[in-house]
Image (tube, grey):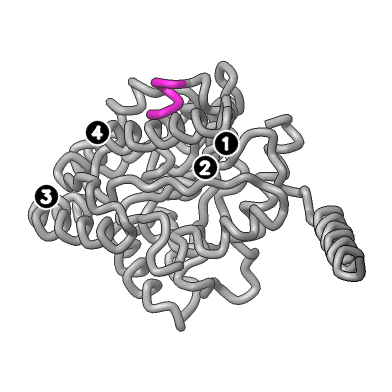
Amino acid sequence: MYKRLLTLAVLVGSALINTACYAAASTTAATKYPIVLVHGMAGFDSIMGIDYFYQVPAELRKNGATVYVASMSSFNDNDVRGEQLLKQMKAWAAAKGYTKFNIIAHSQGGPTARYVQGVAPDMVASITSVGSPHDLTAMQGSNALGDLLTNYSKVVAAFGSVIGWASGSSNLPQDPVALQAWAANTAAFNARFPAGKPTTYCGEGAEKVGNTYFYSVTGNQPATNSWDISDAILKQAAASTPGVATDGLVPVCAAHWGKVLRDDYPWNHLDEINHVLGLIGKGAPDPVAFYVQQASRLKLKGL
């Protein structure tokens, strides 16, 4: 009898603790539809426990969001990457009964997400692109990245395969030449998938097209923290386009798509995903907090 009472007491106590924890949990980021985080070029979902979106998934979940992290080819065009993303979304939808998703995408992930919205619009509630190269038409004379992708395609592809292997996605195809072909003609891709396109270069597009909301944001500082070794690389990359405001890799104006939330964050291209390991500029806004704030914005929209 004593053992039964003790067991009952433990069960009741556990239930009370769980209820208290649940009640104390934040619902700031509890969107109606799950959030899918989409990585960019040279990206991954997670390697050795380190997220591409560093500390972001955990913070979103802590604040009530249901979060999925997609895994796609590190180097390929958006048609291929988009089909990979769509396949994962369909699998999640089939398993859990989801009807739509909110996509938050960094860098090339933005155009990749737009491909999915173009071919399966009913599955996409919103796209928030962060530092994404949507329109590189004005930058066609800057071929440093293009030369790397084309002239060293085998090396780049091998690097992508290593990333895939390390992140548990070694089966994903790597095609730097196809990626370069897209980057060299973003105008053609945008003609195929125009939803959210700004009415003028560096302007804004529609916030809502059909049943999908479009948002964009970017940083504008190539170098932000002297302790961050990647800053030197991004600063050098920015030097190849003098007079053009960039986050180190992507021109500020090229990142505009849909409603522009902000294009002057004091972040570089990696700060936008809280890398490297959270080393951002002194006094700069917390990138992780931005993702929670954006989820809150989507929640208030009923998304």
Contact, mark 1 vs mark 2 (Cβ under 8 Å):
yes
According to the picture, the residue beneath numbered tag 1 turns out to be 102
Q: Residue at x 53, y 72 (%)?
A: 278
Mark sitting earlier along the chain (1/4) = 1
Work out how far the residue at label 2 is from the one at label 3, CA to CA, in angstroms: 30 Å
Q: Which residue is mark 2?
A: 36
Residue 162 appears at what percent x and percent y? 22, 62
Where does label 4 land, which residue?
Answer: 185
Q: Amino acid at mark 1?
A: Asn
User: For the C terminus, which image quadrant?
Assistant: top right
Is residue 204 visible from the viewing direction of this image? no
Three-letter residue code for mark 3:
Thr
Picture mark count: 4
Instruction: Look at the picture and state if 227 lies above or below 300.
Output: below
Which kind of residue does numbered mark 4 sit on? Answer: Asn
Disc 2 is placed on an element classified as strand
Q: Earlier in the sequence, mark 1 or mark 2?
A: 2
